[in-house]
Image: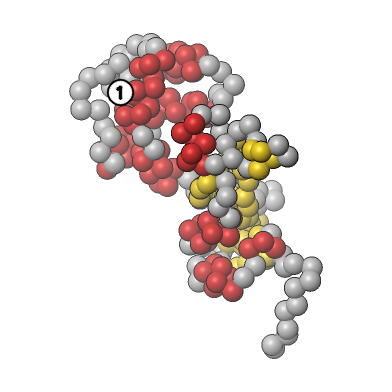
């Protein structure tokens, strides 16, 4: 909702301070639209968005089409902070009691899992995130390391952590494990098994089912 976006912009200090062709609230919607329509051009996404914005009257004024330079400057003014805060306030598990595949014996199924994402071949992104090694030097694209907590039944991602490609998923995990809640059953691969992470995860009150390595011996204490 527009009111939530305005509150996030105010809390992060990124609200528009003067009338612009691309006000901050509109740019937030635009960035979300870019993610939804990743195969379309920047200009086409903006054109389609403006048609909807004029109909819904969400921009606060009548916006106009802008060129690539204006779009780039508007996104730079907005920055990442409002989008990060908006995600933190909105993202949550979505399964209803009757959602197939979302529950096991009354517990909400969630998964801790990681991946990498190819980024544009730009020098600043390569410096920030690094490149994976390849047979002949380095790969053609920088990559970002991403770790998520995802609701299994709906595939809704409700917590994320990201870093350089070289960063290990285990190092990113503690931040996400604190988002677990009682009534959840968290699934994780064998890479995450360890005393510190297990303690962090169980402190949340959630239940855990984590794989162990094939050669890992766990003595029976009781």
Q: Position of residue 2 (x, y in %)?
A: 34, 31
Placement of 183 over or under 57, stated as above or below: below
User: From the image, which quarter does the C terminus lie in?
Assistant: bottom right
User: What colouring does the structure picture have?
Assistant: secondary structure
Residue at position x 57%, y 36% in the image: 142
Q: Position of residue 100 (x, y in %)?
A: 69, 48
Residue at position x 74%, y 67% in the image: 213
Q: Which residue is mark 1?
A: 23
Q: Position of residue 177 (x, y in %)?
A: 52, 61
User: From the image, which quarter does the N terminus lie in?
Assistant: top left
Q: Quadrant of residue 21?
A: top left
Residue at position x 25%, y 28% in the image: 16
Placement of 41 over or under 142, stated as above or below: above
Q: Position of residue 172 (x, y in %)?
A: 53, 56
Residue 58 in view, yes or no: no
Badge 1: residue crowd in 10 Å (few <14, some 14–19, many ≥20): some
Q: Who is closer to the viewer here, 137 or 3?
A: 137
Q: Secondary structure at mark 1?
A: loop
Looking at the image, the residue that sits furthest to the right is 214
Residue 60 in view, yes or no: yes
Placement of 198 over or under 174, stated as above or below: below
Locate residue 204 relative to residue 95 in the image: left or right. Answer: left
Locate residue 130 relative to residue 101 in the image: left or right. Answer: left
């Amino acid at each position: 909702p527009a009111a939530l976006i305005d509150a996030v912009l105010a809390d992060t200090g990124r609200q528009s301070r003067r009338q612009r062709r691309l006000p901050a609230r509109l740019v937030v919607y635009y960035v979300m639209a870019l993610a939804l329509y990743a195969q379309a051009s920047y200009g086409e996404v903006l054109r389609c968005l403006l048609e909807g914005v004029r109909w819904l009257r969400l921009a606060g004024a009548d916006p106009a089409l802008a060129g690539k330079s204006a779009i780039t400057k508007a996104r730079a003014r907005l920055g990442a902070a409002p989008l990060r805060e908006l995600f933190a306030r909105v993202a949550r598990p979505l399964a209803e009691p009757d959602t197939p595949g979302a529950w096991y014996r009354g517990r909400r199924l969630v998964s801790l899992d990681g991946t990498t994402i190819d980024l544009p071949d730009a020098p600043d992104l390569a410096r920030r995130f690094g490149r994976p090694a390849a047979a002949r030097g380095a790969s053609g694209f920088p990559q970002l390391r991403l770790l998520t907590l995802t609701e299994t039944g709906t595939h809704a991602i409700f917590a994320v952590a990201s870093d350089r490609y070289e960063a290990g998923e285990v190092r990113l995990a503690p931040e996400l494990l604190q988002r677990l809640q009682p009534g959840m059953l968290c699934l994780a691969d064998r890479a995450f098994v360890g005393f510190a992470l297990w303690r962090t995860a169980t402190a949340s009150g959630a239940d855990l089912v984590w794989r162990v390595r094939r050669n890992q011996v766990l003595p029976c204490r009781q």
